[in-house]
Amino acid sequence: DSGVTQTPKHLITATGQRVTLRCSPRSGDLSVYWYQQSLDQGLQFLIQYYNGEERAKGNILERFSAQQFPDLHSELNLSSLELGDSALYFCASSETGFPDTQYFGPGTRLTVL
Amino acid sequence: DQQVKQNSPSLRVQEGRISILNCDYTNSMFDYFLWYKKYPAEGPTFLISISSIKDKNEDGRFTVFLNKSAKHLSLHIVPSQPGDSAVYFCAASVGPRTGTASKLTFGTGTRLQVTL
């Protein structure tokens, strides 16, 4: 158990819909990262927050947005969903905003039908 | 543009033998490298890391070697055990001195199967 929790574990929805994925980092970790893993792909970095502020952005679509709240939990919002958005979405946390080990949650599997 | 490449999607090794997983990168700015292990239905778990100022780092049965001139790193597992069967991801990052944030760029993974 990494100490990072993600809800829900599974999500099935239809095209055009909007969903919210939630992540609670390890206690004391200020940095939260979101990654997307599509079929047969490596993890693609989406976005990083550090202590409530956006720190880095990867290949995140404009239809996707995220935020980190004062209690440090984070939400990833995916809107106008397309079939290609079906993937595993991982959240990770680390103690600092600098490159060190990131602890991953178990992921949310999103299926868009 | 895949900046971190793991060209072997799968590897099969006998128990007790050495497993060697390879990773190549193209971005010369990367200076921190990590290996993660992933079991089905779980998130990746950190295994071992290496900074570009080193060429080797060991942790028990796991050793990571870094060849900066070749932009290549490898993970050696000796001896391999059935419990090592998992997908292994190589990841790379640009260090804090550049002022950029610490996003990790991952390879596509190598599925290791350790047989009895």
Image (cartoon, helix red, strand yellow):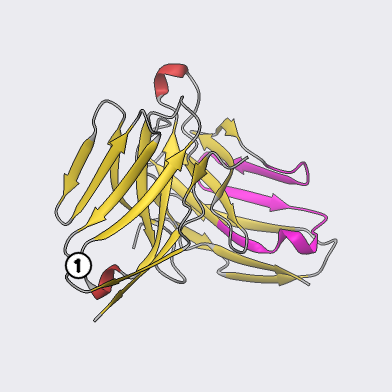
On screen, residue B34 versus residue A16, left or right, reads left
Question: Disc 1 is attached to a residue of which chain?
Answer: B
Is residue A9 shown above or below B98? Answer: below
**Quarter of the figure with the C terminus of chain A:** bottom right
Is residue B84 shown above or below B115? Answer: above
Residue reaching furthest to the right: A16
Q: Position of residue B51 (x, y in %)?
A: 30, 31
Q: Please tell me whether mark 1 sits on a helix, a strand or a loop.
A: loop
On screen, residue A66 versus residue B7, left or right, reads right
Which residue position holds label 1? B17
Residue at 16%, 57% in the rendered image: B61
Residue reaching furthest to the bottom: B116
Is residue B47 shown above or below A9? Answer: above
Can residue A28 be seen from the camera position used here?
no
Can residue B105 be seen from the camera position used here?
yes
- Residue B5 counted in the magenta span: no
**Quarter of the figure with the N terminus of chain A:** bottom left
- Quarter of the image where one finds residue B30: top left
Magenta stretch, residue numbers: A60-89
Residue at 62%, 64% in the rendered image: A39
Nearer-the-camera pick, B64 or B67: B67
Q: Position of residue A42 (x, y in %)?
A: 54, 54
On screen, residue B92 versus residue A76, left or right, reads left
Residue at 43%, 38% in the rendered image: B92
Q: Amino acid at mark 1?
A: Arg
Nearer-the-camera pick, B70 or A38: B70
Query: How packed is label 1: few (under 14 Cα within 10 Å), some, or many (20 or more)?
Result: some
On screen, residue A5 versus residue A22, left or right, reads left
